[in-house]
Image (spheres, rainbow, N blue to C red):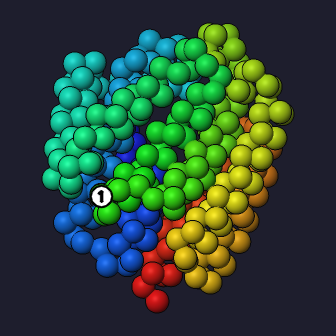
Amino acid sequence: MRLIRFSHTIFALPFALGALAVAAHGRLSLRVLLLVLACMVCARTAAMLFNRLVDWSLDQRNPRTASRHLLISKKAAAILLTLSVAGFILAAAFINRLTLVLSPVALAIIFFYSLTKRFTAATHFFLGLALALAPIGAWIAQTGHVDLAPVILAAGVICWVAGFDLIYATQDYDFDRREGIRSLVVKLGIARALRLAQLLHIATLVALIAFGFVAKLGLIYFCAMSLVAVTLVYEHRSARHLDLAGINRAFFQSNAFVSAIFLIAVCLDRLL
């Protein structure tokens, strides 16, 4: 379904699975793994549908998103949203007590992001926070508590997501400014926003390296971080062109590669 774009889940899912693998010391439970996957899919579906519903009229006025409302009716979207929320809470309930208790909090944070563009330019960081819940939630699913390692990883995800969302938001600069949509791209201008994205991605790399030390990961993981660095550099070089094709390439390919490198590195480190 193009309305939901499950392919976008690849941004957060590898960090959730990586955190799960580290927390389990490489000995993953199939039951927990499947429940975490169910939570991720349901949360992603609910988030996208809620965002579509609250931005329904706004999306119709934006040339880039004008066709989204044609994919599904409001009533169908609301029904699917309700089912996704129920599925998320049910899957969380089957994991452990803490994941059940925290599931409404997670949904509230995820939904709150969709409203932030109306009152704060820091909306990119709220998106980062929403996706950063994935590794923390996966860690809790495995251990039943929170440790320093997933918090550091979550901080890296926040910076990573905020950085690439700044890049992605450059293509809506004119529309957002005209409609009064809050974003750091509108507030700072495109050039300064892209420089901020670079700083955020440097912070991402620092956080990922720090996570490796705290989680006691090995050489494979730290060598893989050099690939992450190269990918982020490529992303920013692609974004310089500021054309739709270049931005989409930077956004989808590069960020999918970053998350995939992280997951592969963690799995190899834990299994070898």
Q: Nearer the viewer, residue 238 or 25?
A: 25
Is 72 situated left or right of 120 in this image?
left
Residue that mark 1 sits on: 144
Q: Taking 127 as reference, is 140 above or below it? A: below
Looking at this rendering, what residue extends furthest in the bottom direction? Answer: 272
Whether residue 141 is situated above or below residue 240 in the rendered picture: below
**123 versus 208 height, above or below:** above
Q: Can you tell which quarter of the image residue 31 is in?
A: bottom left
Name the residue at 43% across, 71% down: 22
Q: Nearer the viewer, residue 152 or 53?
A: 152
Q: Residue at x 22, y 18 (%)?
A: 75
> Residue 91: image x %, image y %?
19, 49
User: Dot 1 lies on which element?
Assistant: loop
Locate residue 178, reporting x and y percent: 67, 10
Are there few (<14), some (14-19), or many (20+) residues within 10 Å of tag 1? some
Residue 248 picture quarter? top right
In the rendered image, which quarter is residue 68 located in?
top left
| Drawn side of residue 65 relative to residue 101, left or right | right
Query: What residue type is disc 1 on?
Result: Gly
> Where does residue 33 sit, x and y in percent of width and height?
27, 64
Relative side of 15 to 212, left or right:
left
Above or below, comparing residue 222 to residue 60 in the picture: below
Q: Position of residue 241 (x, y in %)?
A: 79, 42
- Residue at position x 45%, y 76% in the image: 267
Q: Considering the image in quadrants, where does the N terminus appear? A: top left
Asked if one can make out residue 1 in the rendered structure from this viewpoint, the answer is: no
Residue drawn at point x = 55 percent, y = 14 percent:
118
